Image: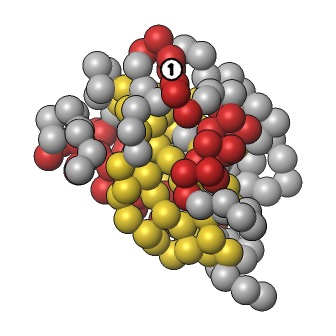
Amino acid sequence: MPERNSISLFLYIPEKHVIVLGVRASQESYPHLLQATCHGTIEDGEDHADAIERELKEETTLNLPDIGPLTFLGELAAGQKQHEKCSYYLASITEKNAKKIQPTAEVGRFIFIAQEEAGMMTPWSVAETKHIDSSHSNVIFDDELEALTMAFELLDEHEWNLVPA
């Protein structure tokens, strides 16, 4: 099976020093797991920006003008059922636009997480081994947690006033 390419976007609210995480809707594929604000496969004919724009609309109901410029965080190996190469991005969002985020069929709700709360999340590999129920605990895929940590570090480095290069 060929490697799949995907994107993940974390939105952050500078005024609140929080990152928005999505909570997967109840479905067969990893229900209640935490994820980046939006995540998805890059479809044929799309570049990263196109995929981000489509996934943002599908998973949050927001449009690209609702968020700030994209900052590339890095690329990590991802995927549970199929190996994928995921490119992670970060973009700011105003409190006003954050209130416009709506649950979708894929993302049941959104939570705002501060940096100190990220350390209390359980990586999916640990949750699977210990049979931890993601509907009662904050479980996140290992690569998403690594990227979230990178996002918080970058935001701290720029005192939450990130200006893309």
Say above or below: 91 vs 95.
Answer: below
Q: Amino acid at mark 1?
A: Ala
Q: Residue furthest bottom?
A: 1
Q: Residue furthest right?
A: 28
Question: In the shown orientation, is residue 30 left or right of residue 151?
Answer: right
In front: 110, or 37? 37
| Quadrant position of the N terminus in the picture | bottom right
Q: How is the image coloured?
A: secondary structure
User: Residue 164: x and y, percent?
Assistant: 27, 45
Q: Is residue 123 visible?
A: no
Residue at left offset 20%, top offset 32%: 161
Say above or below: 132 vs 22.
Answer: below
Say above or below: 150 vs 111.
Answer: below
In front: 153, or 58? 58
Instruction: Using the rendered view, name the quadrant where residue 113 is placed.
Output: top left
Residue at left offset 50%, top offset 47%: 9
Q: Is residue 10 visible?
A: yes
Residue at left offset 68%, top offset 44%: 54
User: Residue 75: x and y, percent?
Assistant: 43, 69
Q: Residue furthest top?
A: 96
Local crowd size for mark 1, using a 10 Å CA cut-off: few (<14), some (14–19), many (≥20): many
Q: Secondary structure at mark 1?
A: helix
User: Residue 38: x and y, percent?
Assistant: 60, 44
User: Residue 66: x and y, percent?
Assistant: 51, 25
